[in-house]
Image: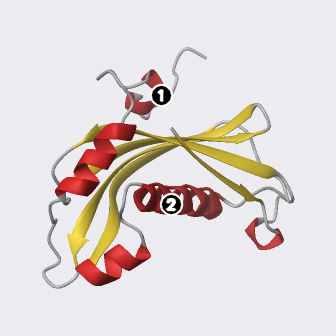
Amino acid sequence: MFIYETKVHEQWIDYNEHMNVAFYYYAFEAAAIELWGFIGVDQTHRTNEEIEIETKEGHIQFIQEASIGDSLRIESQIFHVSEKALLLGQEMFCGENILCRFGSFTEIISRKFGQPRALSKEVFDEALSVKISGSDLPDWFVRRVGINRSR
């Protein structure tokens, strides 16, 4: 597991005085970029290799609101590693309270060709070394969007 910490800044607050939806994504993206850096795909590597990281698909689940000044902890886990991509699960906490979850499919893209590019052996091996053991995804990760009709 990789842990990223940040605070809710004043400019992240919406008209309801809670963290704006866009900044949940922003915080998760910042945590994901740090995780990619941890496994070897930092800014220097991306510049030298002419690659970028793209989130191709994601699902977010809001649980509780964050407010200005809250300290946030994002726990990121790699659930699957392929030749060109990672399946990431992230959970955002304020203290012990879970605020939000985000599951995403991210991959490396060649800037020159705009196509997915294989991870280097070193990055692939490092991703495997921090990948969560087991193959089952948590229920929240595979949850379908829908309306609960039982109410």
Question: In the displayed structure, would residue 59 be above or below residue 47?
Answer: above
How far apart are the two marked residues, 2 and 1, measured between alpha carbons?
Answer: 23 Å
Identified at 14% across, 71% down, the residue is: 115
Query: What's the colour scheme?
Result: secondary structure
Circle 2 or circle 1, nearest the eye: 2
Quarter of the picture containing the C terminus is top right
Mark carried by residue 140: 1
Question: In the displayed structure, would residue 39 be above or below residue 100?
Answer: below
Which residue lies under the disc numbered 2? 34
Query: Which residue in the rendered view is the most extreme toward the front?
Result: 122
Structural crowding at the residue carrying mark 2, measured as other residues with C-alpha within 10 Å and reported as few (<14), some (14–19) or many (≥20): some
Circle 2 sits in a helix, a strand or a loop, which is it? helix
Which label's residue is closer to the chain start, 2 or 1? 2
| Percent position of residue 91, x then y | 58, 39
Q: Is residue 25 left or right of residue 89?
A: right
Q: Nearer the viewer, residue 141 or 82?
A: 82
| Percent position of residue 36, x then y | 41, 58
Q: Is residue 144 visible?
A: no
| Percent position of residue 62, x then y | 62, 41
